[in-house]
Amino acid sequence: MIRRKRNKYGLTLVELLVVVGVVSAIAAVMLPGIKNILTDRKSSQAAIMVKNYLEAARSRAIGRNRSVAVVFERLSSQAIQDPTTGRYISGTALPGPYPTPDTNFIPYNACIRMSLAEEPLPVTEAMLPVAVSFRVRVPGDGLTPAIPTNAPYIGEDALADFHQGMVPEARIFEVTASANINLAWLVGEYLTNGSQISFGDSSRRFSIVSPRSPTVHGNAGGGTIWFSVMNEKLFDGHTERAKEPYVDLNPGMIFKQFKIYQKPKPIFSQTVQLPRGMCVDLSLSGFGKKMPGHGNLSPEKQPVFDPTGAAMPGFDYRLRFASDWISNRPVPPVPEELRPVYVVFSSEGRLSHVWANERRGTGSDPNYQGSLTRIDATQDVFLHVGKIERVTMPVDADPQILGRNALAYKTAASLGVQNNLTDLSAYVVRLSPNSGAITASPVVNLETQISILGLNYNDLNLGDMIELSRRGTYNSNVTAQ
């Protein structure tokens, strides 16, 4: 019997090298595309998370019959205590002084975590053990007692406060009780910055601006405490207080029926974090409201802020949540001055208002503490969702401007610097106060949009570019994600 020799088959070294080379070539071609697909998937996932979280807050507001807010926390909001000064500073942002406006721009404008907050039930006269009276006062009204101008109502807690450094506060309230009682303990914690108050049967809410802390009332002494509200006459019919017309209150008027509304209180158990590397880019987020231009500068050179403050007769609410919009100075805010953004749904499930940083006054303002102000949601709210690494602040090289503007963005784009305004994998989430709709759609090519509309790049400021991106996004995407 003859046994046949079994042949052994295999690859030679040359054949193996050829196979490895072919696989490497295919991988080189395919991997970037796969990476882009995965990145786009993360962008879509992040946008859907933001949209779903907003819808959950809206449903919670309806179900609990009270206002509920989604809190968009800035990375710089993660505070730690400075062992040297004892002040709370950001755990992610660098402490000052700052050499350039773009210092800390990413932690100031990137939101990777959202949480819920509920507006407590309003405090009314029926809830108090004694009657409390609120008397309207204005500086120089001649009434007794005189409005305090000494401690503790001085400095940042002064009653004659300044809103945005432009108009002196003219409405002050003197609070007294019908019995000998500690008013600081009874209502002092509610009558401070960020709370609101309405009187009688009116739904008109006045925003309290000073004092900043309830401890100020505790140091007032006597049976009277004081607070002042935002002077809204300057803002009659536009910007923050667009929904409610200006209401004049005459000195000496007394109110015994009232409702005090506090800011939403965080629900720390209800938090969600976006996928790694993704964020809500607050530097591009804001309202769908176009505001006046900036002095005599050409549109593309108009900065978000101006070092002199002289070239800014109007504030562009399309970038309302950006840190540089808030500062209005070449020196950025310090970490503890930047606050989260609260998007609030009413008990009817309607987009009601937003709490965000009030604008810092022009020039030196050592008393600025980064307080919140309420903004009526009369326009759509737009939240831009993109990559943390593309939260950028291209700065105009002109030392007389030194701010974010359209020219700086165009220059950066020509040099290949990516940002979330032009990144086609980014998304925009829109909230409508009129219909209550919450939608999320991928952005469109900005240059294509400008070309279709026949616009001139040089005639656009940064707010115009952002608005065109939003409009194109929702004209090109009929259905939401």
Image: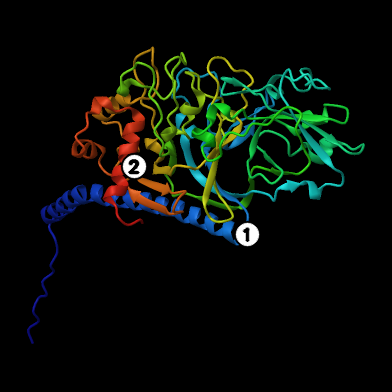
Res 139 quadrant in image: top right
Res 443 visible: no
Q: How many marks?
A: 2
**Could you tell whether 457 is left or right of 267 in the image?**
left
Pick whichever of labels 1 and 2 is earlier in the sequence: 1
Q: Position of residue 237 (x, y in %)?
A: 50, 34
Give the colour scheme of this rendering. rainbow
Which three-letter amino acid code belongs to the residue tagged 2? Arg
Q: Residue at x 69, y 21 (%)?
A: 160
Crowdedness of circle 2 by 10 Å Cα count: few (<14), some, many (20+)?
Answer: many
Q: Residue at x 66, y 24 (%)?
A: 170
In the rendered image, which quarter contains the C terminus? bottom left
Res 77 quadrant in image: top right
In this rendered view, identify the residue nearer to me: 440 or 201: 201
Q: Is residue 240 above or below residue 426?
A: above
Q: Position of residue 463 (x, y in %)?
A: 36, 31
Residue occupied by mark 1: 64
Q: Position of residue 248 (x, y in %)?
A: 64, 31
In the rendered image, which quarter contains the N terminus? bottom left
Res 302 quadrant in image: top left
Res 145 visible: yes
Crowdedness of circle 1 by 10 Å Cα count: few (<14), some, many (20+)?
Answer: few
Which three-letter amino acid code belongs to the residue tagged 1? Arg
The mark found on residue 470 in the picture is 2
